[in-house]
Image: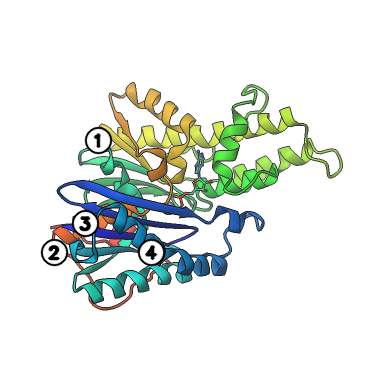
Amino acid sequence: MRVLGIETSCDETGVAVYDSDRGLLAHGLYSQIEIHAEYGGVVPELASRDHVRKLLPMIRQVLADADCVAADITGVAYTAGPGLVGALMVGGSVGRSLAYAWGVPALGVHHMEGHLLAPMLEENPPGFPFVALLVSGGHTMLVRVDGIGEYEILGESLDDAAGEAFDKAAKMLDLDYPGGPQIALLAEQGDASRFRFPRPMTDRPGLDFSFSGLKTYTLNTVAKHKDDAVLPDEQTMADIACAFQDAVVDTLVIKCRRAIEQTGLSTLVIAGGVSANVVLRQRLETALAKKNAQVYYARNEFCTDNGAMIAYAGCQRLLHGQHDDLKILAQPRWPMDTLPALG
Ligand code: KG4
Ligand code: ZN
């Protein structure tokens, strides 16, 4: 089976061709970061319009890179949610229409399932069952994964997602959007002993998260070191970035360790944009090695939004005969534990 995958749920246009025998044949990614940067976050209408501009030329290019013509494609997978409805509609309309024109099945893929399965694109993929920490701009979840579509949500964020917290803290420090990579970079210059930020919800049992208190704590710390409206000096900014990152990472590590203890499993998969964070990866590896558990993640470009993860996830379901009818699916909200198992 050879699947064209399309991702347009937010501010990245991603396209890929995945072959069930030969693996990933080609992929392309266009990030809209420059368009949204001046607004400090994603502007939904601008995102939709740019997907309209970029998607068809990208599909042509990726098919050429994969050395394919339309007749070689035997299925189309597009992100059907969760995400921005206008942006989802672009990928859904194009994906569903191409599948109709080509006479092949189409499938709307769950964006977070795409993230969850992205490490399967690597050379040494994790095996089921495992615990997954999904940390993106919109979601923070711990999930027990017994197979594709066999998901038990163990815990999730009660307010902001981890990536969202990174983005908001970055804004407080006047860093560019998206803030995660910027905070990580600035934190490298920080003195970890200067500030200690709270580790929210780690002193009580359970696997849920909350990052809004940490956000307020960061805002108050920045305000305390501001001179009138002038931002703190560079070293203080780096120290704050470092303390913030340490607090988020520690919180995630504590909950992952707890999830591994609770489930008795020995594999942890981390996925979503924040899984590109080097400090998070290192601390998880160290903490879980003590529990004889192993940590898996995708290469950086497949941690953040991309078309390859959608082509891969779609291909697995299409191979098992799952596909949609002629409807164009766009579900801004879509609980992951309602997905069907492969069966
Ligand atoms: O998965 P993703 O590309 O999009 C969503 O599905 O939301 O995740 C984007 C998020 C952003 O909030 C971004 O700041 C964060 O991932 N991120 C990072 C890093 N790289 C991306 N956060 C912390 N450290 C990073 N290195
Ligand atoms: Zn994502």
Q: Residues within 10 Å of mark 3 (few under 14, many from 20)?
A: many
Q: Is 321 located above or below residue 207 in the figure?
A: below
Question: Is tag 1's residue or tag 2's residue first in the polypeptide sequence?
Answer: 1
Nearer the viewer's eye, disc 3 or disc 4? Answer: 3
- Check disc 2 and give the amino acid type: Gly
Nearer the viewer's eye, disc 1 or disc 4? Answer: 1
Pinpoint residue 126: horizontal percent, then vertical percent.
Answer: 24, 37
Q: Secondary structure at mark 2?
A: loop
Q: Quadrant of residue 41?
A: bottom right
The residue that label 3 is drawn on is 315
In this view of the protein, can residue 2 be seen by the observer? yes
Question: Is tag 3's residue or tag 4's residue first in the polypeptide sequence?
Answer: 4
Mark 1 near mark 4, Cβ–Cβ under 8 Å?
no
Nearer the viewer's eye, disc 1 or disc 2? Answer: 1
Nearer the viewer's eye, disc 2 or disc 3? Answer: 3
- Check disc 1 and give the amino acid type: Glu
